[in-house]
Amino acid sequence: MAPDGPRVHVIGAGLAGLACAVALARKGRPVSVYEAAGHAGGRARSFRDARLERVIDNGSHLLLAGNRSVFRFLDHIGARDQLVGPRETRFPFLDLSDGRRWMVRAGHGLWPSWVFDPARRVPDTRARDYLSGLRLARARPDATVAEVLGDTGPLYDRFWRPLAVSALNTEAELGQARLLWPVLRETFGRGGWAARPLWAREGLSEAFVRPALKRLAHWNAEVRFGRRLKDLEVTDGRVSRLIFQDDAEQVAAEEAVVLAVPPWTASLLLPGLKAPNEFRSIINVHFRLPSAPRRIAQPLGLLGGTGEWLFVRGDVASVTISAADSLLDLPPDSMAAPVWPEVRRALGLPADTPVPPVRVIKEKRATFAQTPDQVGRRPGPRGPLRNLFLAGDWTDTGLPATIEGAVRSGHTAAKSVVALQRGS
Ligand SMILES: Cc1cc2nc3c(=O)[nH]c(=O)nc-3n(C[C@H](O)[C@H](O)[C@H](O)COP(=O)(O)OP(=O)(O)OC[C@H]3O[C@@H](n4cnc5c(N)ncnc54)[C@H](O)[C@@H]3O)c2cc1C
């Protein structure tokens, strides 16, 4: 089917831009995607690392089976089989401060039988402690996770706090409590199956980027790399021209523009836009192990150490350190030094195993800081110009800044474009 109708110009080929472009192109809309970098994927991408001689992700990404927008996107691009995880919903943990290990095993159904079973829930907690999660639904917009849940003892230390840091990439003392509620509602609220952890089998690019680009080519959508948008020309309250570094693109009367760039770029292009302007980093430390561990229950939650999650793909072990701003200035070797003994313990490797080749990746602005104040700065999908729409994990999706949020924002923008062009 040849594309038909007014063209949609999508700026940015991160997952929000790709999801938006795919949703439109598969319906036969002409789509052009412009990406500043030489590759797609934005903050979720893979590359071959010369030191490790392996393909690694810029950061390990944890997804959940209840991420419905992610699965819709994967179905659109024919890549559902790229996500893998355990058959049951289970999260193994290791407390590095005392060596204690446990496994939260949530089962499949809606009835949370696991909270009544001491062997399946967080150690030293009681079934009634878990009711505290309901407080998130009623939390005031200005309340932090620590203010709402900080009195829940071991459940806070071993569940709520790590969940907050992972899901919000913000310290529990500062992160907005209310933003955690949709995470619970869309996972445990739909049944234990929806909280099942998943990750990309061969890497983020194989799961999301390569199949999306392939489908876009199949639907005759254009994807142009190395095209950095510098300015928007405005005529009669609508975008009429896209000004790139080296050239420009006309935007005809019925055409629409979706800005799927990070908030700092959107704010430069649209002076006066209220958008998040504080950020948190994520550091990933990737080790190439002497050999691939035979069996590891993962992702392994780490408490009392430097990072929060350990993922293993083949012979590469990767530790994620969220809200890592205090570590950003450390040289890579000083950062890897305390992490290696933690990985060694987690994997049960002999104490004299030398530090293997390591790659440290610092993503300085991994997400916006999900504090009450910053959450209040998220704009909706309608831009300040008639034919302009916004997408990205930082827009007001109602979800934390995650792949699920980015993809959902892309789908929402696509829907809004179609509604505008239909005249509704
Ligand atoms: C290390 C790390 C770990 C993470 N872990 C998780 C996790 O475990 N689970 C999870 O769900 N999420 C995780 N996230 C968050 C997730 O990666 C993001 O929410 C998601 O990738 C954001 O996608 P996006 O499309 O909104 O933005 P981006 O990926 O930032 O895409 C924006 C795109 O716009 C392009 N661009 C910028 N300026 C211009 C311009 N002027 N002209 C043209 N193009 C431009 C950029 O190059 C980029 O490709 C993590 C993020 C990081 C960095």
Image (cartoon, rainbow, N blue to C red):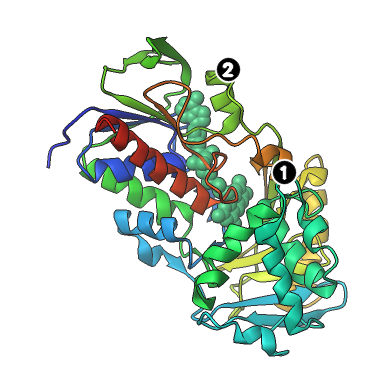
Looking at the rendered structure, the kind of residue marked 2 is Pro
Q: From the viewer's side, name the closer residue of 362 and 174.
A: 174
Residue 68 lies in quadrant: bottom left
Other residues around mark 2 within 10 Å, as few (<14) / some (14–19) / many (≥20): few
Whether residue 110 is situated above or below residue 356 in the rendered picture: below
Numbered badge on residue 372: 1
- How many discs mark residues in the rendered view? 2
Q: Position of residue 91 (x, y in %)?
A: 63, 75
Whether residue 9 is situated above or below residue 400 in the rendered picture: above
Picture residue at 69% right of the left edge, 48% below the top: 282
Q: Position of residue 292 (x, y in %)?
A: 58, 73
Picture residue at 78% right of the left edge, 59% below the top: 148
Q: Position of residue 155 (x, y in %)?
A: 78, 73
Which quadrant: the N terminus? top left
Numbered badge on residue 271: 2
Could you tell me if residue 24 is visible in this image? Answer: yes
Q: Is residue 343 left or right of residue 30?
A: right
Which quadrant: the C terminus? top left
Picture residue at 26% right of the left edge, 17% below the top: 253
Of the two numbered discs 2 and 1 in the rendering, the one whose residue sits closer to the viewer = 1
Q: Is residue 244 left or right of residue 371?
A: left
Is there CB contact under 8 Å for labels 2 and 1?
A: no
Q: Position of residue 251 (x, y in %)?
A: 31, 18
Other residues around mark 1 within 10 Å, as few (<14) / some (14–19) / many (≥20): some
Looking at the rendered structure, the kind of residue marked 1 is Pro
